[in-house]
């Protein structure tokens, strides 16, 4: 900190904040004529990185005690000071979430000398440079339509509706946070609109939207984190984040900070705040992980996401379908890597308001790359689709049969499905390709119903919403063994018919042109399942093991077909071939 005022050399004195108390960080020059103020805030490394970030929309995510609020607060100060006549909006889902945190902290820190007017009824502060700071709840997106902002801050963003964020982005258009382009003569350069109006060409733009929250599934992950052009990790962050280059937004960045990044916390802060806490809580609220969220049905689903690749032709496939009309109708396709013992979900298809004919066409298009004999089992469908659904008492599965598609019903019990799918996730036996974006989104947002009467706060039953892809995935894992490497394959065609069992044949071969086949079958029946396990004997030309102590007796019962005519009288009256013939 500067020891004395750099303008006049006078000593510093404590300044009075907006709430009439000594300011937390600000000092002022003791010389009344100097009018110099000093912010003694010194950012830590992660805070300095945030303050230098030039992106328009910036995610400020982190664990408890990581300094998120202080970082956001100082960033708002900076924007207010460099943006005369601008408009900044601070809000949260409910007013108490900002009134008892950042609003209170600002009032206890910013010098009252910077303030021109405070309107407590309408919740805004006007500063002497013409900038207005407003506070509003974000519970209703429609109430945000009239603002013309240079910056905004969303506090506890994970609890705010996605549409509020969308609306705030459209409100960030106030030109007070811009500098126009000038020509060599110092005149503003304009471009002409279609109606002839001249519009200044912008050289610099420092409009700012800050999204502050603890890590969580939902829109802060999908609309901010995973579309960020740059992601900065501070502290003990172990998560690896993937951003599709085609989806990356150059206007968005994210900072993820663990609790340990704040060097000013008490030494035992992490220890006493993690005592007896579940692992998902520690990972989310201390280590800043987006892979764990409270109440998620499948908390480890994000750890199973992999890059896309072409499925080898020899991998067997499995497909499940969850039917919907107003909701999505979803096909999910998987393939089994026997060598690794993994199920790989490699594709999905979704549609709405389609009739059975269109769904059948989509099914054939979706499965056209699966060769005959490449199916693990017939395609799976919602088990509720079997009961009659129309006045003609014809089931949905019957309708699909009209188009040559034979479905089998999926497993009904939801608890068993959840246990099986979670086992696949936790054992690492399930992988999901990144292109299955809707399925990944469903898994991120699929949570148990809340119930404050139980200790966990959840009922143990998932919310039956946005889960059509999940249902299909659950049915797929229920059809497979607990270890996919143990799979025994059938042979199915594209219509889901096992061509070795249910193909309209009796199961008995035609007894014609098969003499060589018979001989080959007898040979394999005489050998062990693994020829390497064979124990050899010593046989004569008649097939008798001459090392066997019963060889002499076997000579007396030699088969007539292998004996000379004069020996027939000494032979058995009934040979093994006679026995076999009589049995046949």
Image (spheres, grey):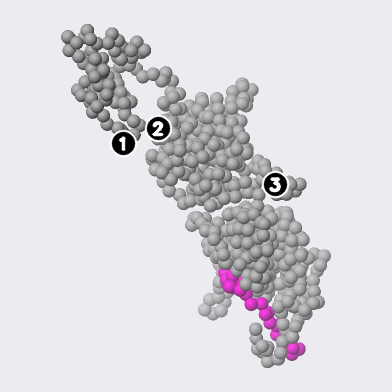
Q: Earlier in the sequence, mark 2 or mark 3?
A: 2
**Comparing marks 2 and 3, which lies closer to the viewer?**
3
Q: Do the residues bearing badges 3 and 1 touch, measured as CB atoms within 8 Å?
A: no
Q: Residue 451 in the image: x percent, y percent?
A: 73, 46
Q: Between residue 371 and residue 531, name the one nearer to us.
A: 531
Q: Between residue 197 and residue 322, name the one nearer to us.
A: 322
Q: Residue at horizontal 48%, vertical 43%?
A: 343
Q: Is residue 140 left or right of residue 262?
A: right
**Comparing marks 3 and 1, which lies closer to the viewer?**
1
Residue wearing tag 3: 458
Q: Is residue 191 left or right of residue 307?
A: right
Say the numbered circle drawn on residue 372: 2
Q: Residue 502 in the image: x percent, y percent?
A: 45, 23
Quarter of the image holding residue 386?
top right
Q: Earlier in the sequence, mark 3 or mark 1?
A: 3
Q: Do the residues bearing badges 2 and 3 touch, measured as CB atoms within 8 Å?
A: no
Determine if the magenta segment contains residue 513.
no
Secondary structure beneath label 3: strand
Residue 114 in the image: above or below residue 201: below
Which quadrant of the rendered structure holds the C terminus? Answer: top left
Q: Which residues are magenta?
A: 29-54
Residue 145 in the image: above or below residue 88: above
**Comparing marks 2 and 1, which lies closer to the viewer?**
1
Secondary structure beneath label 1: helix
């Amino acid at each position: 900190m500067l020891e004395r005022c750099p303008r006049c050399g006078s000593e510093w004195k404590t300044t009075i904040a907006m709430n009439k108390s000594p300011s937390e960080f600000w000092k002022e020059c003791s010389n009344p004529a100097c009018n110099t103020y000093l912010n003694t805030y010194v950012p830590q490394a992660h805070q300095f990185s945030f303050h230098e970030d030039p992106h328009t929309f910036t995610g400020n995510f982190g664990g408890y005690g990581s300094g998120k609020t202080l970082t956001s607060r100082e960033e708002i100060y900076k924007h207010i000071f460099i943006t005369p006549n601008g408009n900044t909006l601070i809000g949260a889902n409910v007013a108490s979430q900002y009134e008892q945190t950042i609003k209170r902290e600002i009032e206890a820190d910013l010098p009252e000398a910077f303030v021109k007017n405070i309107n407590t009824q309408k919740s805004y502060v006007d500063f002497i440079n013409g900038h207005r700071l407003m506070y509003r709840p974000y519970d209703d997106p429609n109430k945000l339509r009239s603002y013309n902002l240079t910056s905004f801050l969303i506090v506890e963003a994970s609890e705010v509706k996605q549409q509020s964020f969308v609306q705030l982005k459209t409100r960030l258009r106030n030109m007070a946070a811009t500098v126009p382009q000038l020509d060599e003569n110092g005149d503003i350069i304009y471009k002409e609109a279609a109606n002839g109006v001249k519009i200044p060409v912008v050289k610099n733009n420092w409009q700012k939207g800050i999204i502050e929250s603890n890590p969580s599934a939902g829109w802060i992950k999908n609309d901010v984190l995973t579309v960020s052009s740059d992601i900065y990790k501070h502290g003990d962050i172990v998560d690896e984040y993937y951003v599709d280059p085609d989806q990356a937004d150059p206007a968005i960045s994210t900072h993820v900070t663990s609790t340990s990044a704040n060097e000013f916390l008490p030494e035992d802060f992490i220890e006493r705040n993690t005592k007896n806490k579940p692992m998902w809580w520690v990972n989310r609220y201390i280590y800043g992980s987006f892979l764990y969220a409270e109440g998620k049905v499948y908390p480890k689903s994000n750890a199973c996401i992999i890059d896309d690749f072409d499925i080898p032709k020899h991998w067997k496939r499995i497909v499940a379908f969850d039917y919907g009309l107003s909701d999505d109708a979803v096909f999910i396709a998987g393939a089994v890597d026997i060598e690794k013992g993994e199920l790989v979900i490699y594709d999905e298809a979704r549609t709405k308001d389609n009739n059975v004919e269109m769904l059948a066409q989509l099914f054939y298009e979706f499965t056209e790359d699966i060769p005959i004999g490449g199916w693990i089992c017939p395609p799976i469908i919602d088990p509720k689709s079997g009961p009659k659904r129309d006045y003609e008492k014809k089931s949905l599965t019957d309708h699909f049969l009209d188009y040559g598609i034979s479905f089998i019903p999926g497993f009904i019990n939801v608890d068993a499905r959840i246990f099986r799918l979670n086992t696949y996730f936790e054992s690492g036996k399930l992988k999901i390709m990144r292109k299955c974006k809707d399925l990944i989104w469903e898994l991120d947002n699929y949570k148990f119903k809340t119930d404050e009467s139980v200790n966990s706060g959840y009922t143990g039953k998932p919310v039956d919403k946005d889960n059509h892809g999940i249902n299909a995935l659950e049915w797929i894992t229920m059809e497979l063994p607990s270890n996919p490497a143990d799979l025994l394959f059938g042979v199915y065609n594209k219509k889901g018919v096992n061509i070795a069992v249910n193909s309209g044949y009796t199961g008995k071969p035609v007894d014609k042109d098969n003499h060589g086949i018979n001989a080959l079958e007898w040979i394999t029946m005489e050998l062990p399942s693994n020829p390497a396990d064979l124990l050899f004997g010593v046989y004569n030309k008649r097939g008798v093991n001459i090392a066997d102590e019963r060889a002499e007796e076997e000579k007396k019962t030699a088969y007539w077909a292998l004996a000379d005519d004069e020996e027939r009288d000494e032979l058995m009256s009934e040979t093994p071939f006679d026995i076999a013939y009589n049995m046949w």
